[in-house]
Amino acid sequence: IRHHSRSLHTFLDSEYLDFFTHVYPLERLDELKRDLGAFLKTPVDFARFQTGGRKIDVGTLTRDRLDKLLDVYDRDYTLLEGIYSKDSVIEAWESSRGRA
């Protein structure tokens, strides 16, 4: 599970994304598949092997736990500025808890 929870800046060993030509948020995986397919001149698909199990909603976290996670991944949010933000996570948490 470590590779799922390891911070991005630690995984990349960098504070910057400038060595990438493109950065795709998860919400744009279809665009990544299209671009890779065009580059490789063959269709690209991403298999999903672990699609079962219980879905855990962000709203199940207490505010304390949410703040702790945001603190742990603070440098990642700085790295991904303009793609993901702490504010958007807090808004999703509030919405999930019926506070939006």
Image: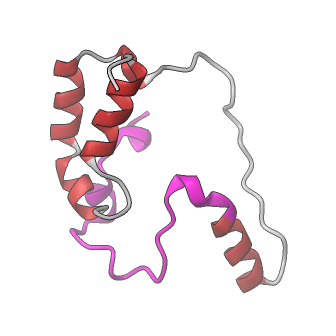
Q: Quadrant of the C terminus?
A: top left
Q: Quadrant of residue 11?
A: bottom left
- Compared to 85, does 30 lie above or below? below
- Compared to 22, does 49 lie above or below? above
Judge from the rendering whether residue 64 lies leftward or rightward of residue 31; answer left or right. left
Q: Quadrant of residue 95?
A: top left
Query: Measuring 28% from the left and 63% from the top, which residue is drawn there?
Result: 81
Q: Position of residue 5 (x, y in %)?
A: 36, 39
- Compared to 85, does 32 lie above or below? below
- Compared to 22, does 57 lie above or below? above
Q: Position of residue 22 (x, y in %)?
A: 49, 77
Q: Residue 28 in magenta?
A: yes
Q: What span is in magenta? A: 1-30
Q: Disc count in the image? A: 0
Query: Measuring 71% from the left and 85% from the top, which residue is drawn there?
Result: 39
Front residue of 57 and 40: 57
Q: Quadrant of the N terminus?
A: top left
Judge from the rendering whether residue 35 lies leftward or rightward of residue 65; answer left or right. right
Judge from the rendering whether residue 72 lies leftward or rightward of residue 36; answer left or right. left
Q: Position of residue 44 (x, y in %)?
A: 78, 66
Query: Measuring 53% from the left and 53% from the top, which residue is drawn there?
Result: 26
